[in-house]
Image (spheres, helix red, strand yellow):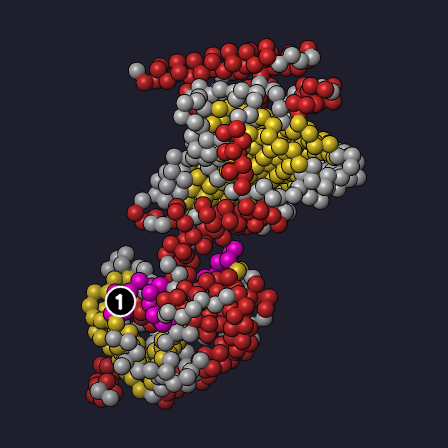
Amino acid sequence: MNLLEVTNLHAAIEEDGTEILKGINLVIRPGEVHAIMGPNGSGKSTLAHVLSGRPGYTVTQGTALFLGKDLLAMPAEIRAREGVFLAFQYPVEIPGVSNTYFLRTAVNTVRKHRGQPELDAIDFLALLDGKAKLVEMEEALLNRSVNEGFSGGEKKRNEVLQMAILDPKLAILDETDSGLDIDALRIAAAGVNALRDGSRGMLVITHYQRLLDYIIPDFVHVLSDGKIVKSGDKELAKELEAKGYSWIEKGPVVTAPTAAGVASR
Amino acid sequence: MTLPARASAIHDGVATLVGRANGFAARRPSPPWLQKLRTAGVSAFEKLGFPSTNDEDWRFTNLAPLARTAFVLSPDEVSLAERTAALELEARLGPLGLSSPGPRIVFVNGRPLRWNAGALTSGVSFEWLKRVLAHSPERVERALVAPAPEGDSSNKFFGALGDAFLDDGVVLRVPANTSIEEPLFILHVATPAWSSEAPRMVHTRNLFTFEENSSATVVEAYLGGSGPSLMNARTDVTLAKGARLNHVKLQLEGPEAFHVGQLAVDHAAGAHAASHVFSFGGKVVRNEIAMSLRGEGATTELNGLFCATSGQHVDCHTLIDHALPRGSSVELYKGVLDGTGRGVFDGKILVRAGAVRTDARQTNRNLVLSNSALVDSKPQLEIHNNDVRCTHGSTTGRLDADAVFYLRSRGLSPEAARALLTYAFGSELIEKVPSADVRAFLENHLRAWLPANLAAPEAR
């Protein structure tokens, strides 16, 4: 069964009705890593938000099935419990809630939903210890308030840590590379790569090709004006890096036959 | 016609209380100075009556429901029913409950119930005011007849009423260079009003004297059942040079309770007082703190968490009076308002001309959980010299929608997310409390306060 099957998805900003997604079609099978690239304003983050159930958007047309279930009908927390994980572009600081307490609450909520026994403090700490090593997260950060005073890199590592602990079936990484230097990027990407296991699907959203040097995608899609205008393999990302997005944005008009050819892959 | 009827009910309420105070004074044979103090209290209250919302210090707090209720003093004898009810309420304090081993004085409806010495350091006196007044009244005469702290007139109404009914409370004296490690516990239990009885009132007065370089932590807890009751509590503290007080007030009475409490601390040079107020609602609750820094380099810290839900009103009123150089004060008050709950923060920092090099920081943050909750914040700085550093800030807002979504995206239900964020908002103040047992109690109490109130905010 397909992990994620998005068909003709249209979505608008709830407040003013501005349509951002204008007919997205996307299929992710278990184990596949898909990258979504595109210029600013093309709808990349909106796609991540709509799939994860963030309030503020209205789906006007289309469907999204997660393992055959209607994803769009589920509240955000049910999507998370069913196995959809969003790594935030801008992780939220939560003063007063310790990272460890938060992670344990989250993992037990998810485990309960999946019919697994809740973890006691000792089992949880053992799990946390192992996963923290994966993203080179120091113990001090685990005891601090969630993301409070974390550097950009520490916040992104914390997202990958949460992903590792919650063990999702589909991970959506929203601009995980933004604001990271190359070392921080390398650590975060190594954490993500360690979670590639042949069954977990990933949707990697990024503006730049450099993240895809570290997280090698199976498929690359280019989003422009709310639609996927081009799809290909990892070579497409390199082509984009070399030629820039203007090539694609003008693409459908100037080189219509090529775009049609790729779309029918 | 409603207004005149109300006004006359309040007038009758004042007259009834004056009559009760005169009757009470006649039943308590006392030395002349004490008789005079009570009589002066009665006359002052007769003249002042209850404060109205025209009084600037009471602008946001309407006492008409209190004034209309005919409260009575409890008979001197504690009944078996009161004793049983008090034990049940006390047992609910968890880590601070009946098994708590520390020094402890317990009152039920204002009358003495129990006294535990705990491991009290020798030389420390921790005793009933009533007993001191009966056997050696001269020990407390000076403290009782002392005028109220200068510049603080907000509690004149209830101060007068307290003098009129002056009877009991706690006298604490900590000798010089003595540190008491274990918190001293003063517990007031208001038993649920039995249907056949008039609601009870209590007027209590604590007198604490800290000699040079002494230190102690005092916890005052006010518990109550259902039904109306009135607690009028006042604690006057004198800190000698270098003395340190940690004061924790736990206001845990029932939803129908009226509570007016004042803590006034007089600091000598280098003295330090930290006040921690945790107020969990009632019909009308007023928490007053008056910190008077009348010694060089005196420092004070004021922390407060006040919570109110539907039908409740909690008013926090603080005054920090910097009178001499190099004093400092740090104040953080947070309000959590839900349902139709109403909160007030009125905090004044006064820096006198001589109080150069004063460092004062005041913060008030309020969290509003429903559309009908309301909070009035009135921070005031009054500064009479230029060589100071004073900051203040006040914010009132709702839960951060981004934070709620972040938690939901990790599987937490909207209710659990809101509860966790609200708990985190309040827990900052719990973490500042110096006693682990008190912190443990408060963590549980705040959590228990949350879920019922956060179940479905959208629906309200």
Percent across and percent down for residue A181 are: 52, 75
Residue A11 falls left or right of residue A149:
left
The chain ID associated with circle 1 is A
What quarter of the picture does the C terminus of chain A occupy? bottom left
In the rendered view, tell whether residue A162 sits above or below residue B425: below
Q: Nearer the viewer, residue B104 or B371?
A: B104
Quarter of the image for residue B115 reads top right
- The answer to which image quadrant residue B392 occupies is top right
Looking at the picture, how far across and down is residue B217, in whole percent? 67, 41
- Identify the residue position indicated by label 1 in the image: A72
Question: In the image shown, does B344 or A199 lie closer to the viewer?
Answer: A199
Q: Residue at x 41, y 44 (%)?
A: B368
**In terms of image quadrants, where is residue A15?**
bottom left
Is residue B234 visible in the rendered image? The answer is no
What residue appears at the point 41 percent right and 23 percent down from the top-left corner? B196
Where is residue B249 shown, x and y percent of the image?
Answer: 58, 38
* Residue B282 coordinates in the image, percent (x, y): 45, 34
Q: Secondary structure at mark 1?
A: helix
Q: Is residue B309 magenta?
A: no
Q: Residues within 10 Å of mark 1 (few under 14, many from 20)?
A: some
Q: As rendered, which of A50 and B438 lies closer to the eye?
A: B438
Which region is colored magenta? Answer: A70-97
Is B269 situated above or below B28? Answer: below
Task: Please tell me which residue is depicted at 20% across the width and 70% down the height of the picture.
Answer: A62
* Residue ID at (54%, 20%): B75
